[in-house]
Image (spheres, rainbow, N blue to C red):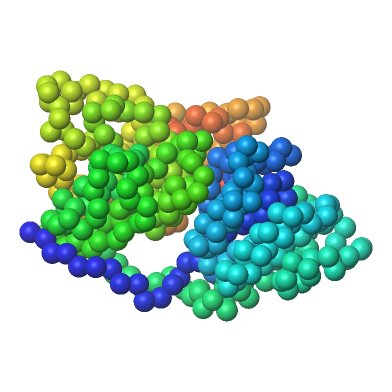
């Protein structure tokens, strides 16, 4: 029924860049500036909790993952030096390139020097960035930064968007030195990448082992056994699947410092390189906010999604329990009503291959393309039935639409006064296009663009 073989990576096409520095030097502001949107929470209060850890970032055609590490944070009750060392070492070990941020508005501190010492010993590629340089070029007193032992500091003001181009040029130079490819790896187009995620101890490794048919991955009752992502290729019914096992994910506020934080980062990174995400839920524990939050990661990354309920072998009244769980799933996962639900038992290997069958179907849905003339006739028809709702005096008017991409399907709709569309109308359009064309199991993207005339 199936064959197993290992994935071998021969070329690196994605680099990990970690931003580190002591609290309140502007790491999150720099993170937001580089990715081009406000993603990490910023505050004048040192050590503000971030709501995200990473984001894809393209620098001069280099594909990277940019990490806002939370920096050299420490608890005043803990040994500062030990904690600084722990956090810095973990960030360094996980990164190909480290951006070391200091605050130009303050004198260098003991912790700046401590972190610099660790970075120098790491032999990793380092870019020193002096942030909060509001008057770049007016007074470049950067001599103090040479004592940190690096090349000349790149002067930036993340808040005011100054010096960012210089920083990106330096990043590109370092990535070239690291021999990071600008092109994506040549992969088998028929290979479906499936990422298995879920809270700790949901049975992710057990599922991979059940599919694999051997005890390839350590399985334990202790939550959090898996710390690395592990790839396994499986051929099932002449179809190839790459199964990615990940560390357990928790809500950001529940993630502990250190190893768990970066294990979670690797799990989130695995979502980025997958086609389909299988959210594994412990059926004996019920549906939690943590499960919903993890599903949001897959939705934001625009992946296919399967909700897999594990440990059905422990259900006492199976049919009644399944009915109860389906009701709760529909309530709590109302933001992804298109995600299929499958009940499995990794222990008994019951229904586990349904995940692969569903994945094959979802991949076909993600590759679906609607011809432009047909798509426009469809939108005109449903908009005649329910005219575009407006949130202002200016009435939006539909002009035309096209499908601009697949995997995931992406649609671009042009409206006159597009900014006046009521927030509920895009959801109506998505619901209607799903009724007509399916796209079951996958997210779709709909962008609305303002068009004043046909030729503008």
Horizontal relation, residue 301 to residue 456: left or right: left
Q: Where is residue 246 in the image (x, y as percent from the top left)?
A: 34, 51
Residue drawn 58% across and 73% down?
A: 123
In which quarter of the view is residue 345 placed? top left
Q: Nearer the viewer, residue 99 or 61?
A: 99
Residue 197, relative to residue 193: is it above or below? above
Q: Where is residue 111 in the image (x, y as percent from the top left)?
A: 70, 54
Give the left or right position of residue 65, taking residue 343 as reference: right
> Can you give x and y, in whole percent of width and height, for residue 453 in the image?
62, 49
* Residue sitting farthest toward the front: 79
Side of 72 where 91 appears, left or right: left
The one nearer the camera, 348 or 81, is: 81
Rendered view: 340 above or below 276: above
Res. 415 in view = no
Q: Which residue is located at x 57 percent, y 33 percent?
A: 421
Q: Which residue lies furthest to the left in this view?
A: 1
Specify the quadrant of the image occupied by residue 136: bottom right
The C terminus, quarter of image: bottom right
Q: Which residue is drawn at 30% across and 72% down?
A: 8
Residue 249 at x, y percent in the picture: 40, 43
Asked if residue 321 shows in the view, the reply is yes
Q: Quadrant of the N terminus?
A: bottom left
Relative depth, front residue between 156 and 387? 156
Q: Residue at x 43, y 43 (%)?
A: 297
Q: How many labels does the image show?
A: 0
Q: Which of 211 and 236 is in front in this view?
A: 211
Residue 354 horizontal side relative to residue 178, left or right: left
């Amino acid at each position: 029924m199936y064959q197993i073989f290992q994935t071998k990576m021969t070329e690196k096409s994605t680099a990990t860049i970690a931003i580190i520095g002591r609290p309140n030097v502007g790491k999150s502001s720099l993170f937001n500036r580089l990715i081009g949107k406000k993603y990490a929470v910023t505050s004048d209060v040192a050590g503000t909790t971030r709501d995200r850890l990473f984001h894809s970032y393209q620098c001069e055609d280099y594909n990277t993952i940019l990490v806002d590490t939370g920096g050299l944070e420490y608890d005043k009750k803990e040994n500062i030096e030990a904690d600084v060392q722990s956090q810095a070492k973990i960030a360094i070990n996980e990164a190909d390139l480290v951006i070391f941020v200091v605050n130009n508005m303050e004198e260098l501190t003991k912790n700046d020097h401590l972190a610099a010492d660790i970075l120098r010993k790491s032999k990793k590629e380092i870019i020193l960035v002096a942030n909060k340089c509001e008057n770049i070029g007016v007074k470049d007193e950067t001599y103090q930064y040479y004592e940190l032992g690096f090349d000349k500091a790149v002067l930036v003001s993340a808040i005011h968007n100054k010096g960012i181009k210089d920083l990106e040029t330096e990043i590109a130079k370092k990535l070239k030195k690291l021999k990071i490819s600008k092109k994506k790896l040549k992969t088998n187009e028929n290979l479906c990448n499936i990422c298995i995620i879920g809270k700790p101890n949901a049975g992710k490794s057990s599922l991979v082992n059940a599919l694999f048919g051997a005890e390839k991955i350590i399985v334990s009752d202790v939550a959090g056994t898996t710390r690395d992502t592990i790839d396994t290729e499986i051929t099932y019914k002449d179809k190839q699947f790459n199964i990615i096992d990940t560390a357990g994910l928790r809500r950001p506020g529940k993630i502990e410092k250190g190893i768990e934080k970066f294990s979670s980062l690797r799990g989130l990174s695995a979502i980025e390189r997958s086609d389909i995400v299988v959210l594994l839920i412990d059926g004996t524990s019920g549906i939690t906010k943590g499960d919903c939050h993890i599903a949001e990661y897959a939705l934001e990354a625009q992946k296919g999604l399967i909700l897999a309920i594990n440990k059905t072998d422990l259900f006492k009244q199976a049919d009644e329990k399944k009915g109860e769980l389906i009701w709760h799933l529909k309530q709590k996962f109302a933001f992804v009503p298109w995600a299929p639900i499958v009940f499995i038992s990794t222990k008994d290997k019951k229904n586990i291959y349904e995940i692969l069958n569903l994945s094959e179907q979802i991949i076909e849905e993600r590759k679906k393309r609607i011809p432009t003339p047909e798509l426009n006739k469809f939108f005109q028809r449903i908009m005649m039935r329910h005219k575009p709702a407006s949130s202002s005096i200016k009435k939006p008017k539909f002009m035309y639409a096209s499908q601009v991409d697949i995997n995931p399907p992406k649609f671009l709709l042009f409206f006159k006064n597009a900014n006046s569309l009521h927030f509920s109308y895009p959801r109506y359009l998505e619901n209607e296009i799903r009724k007509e064309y399916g796209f079951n199991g996958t997210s779709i993207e709909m962008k609305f663009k303002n068009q004043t005339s046909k030729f503008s």
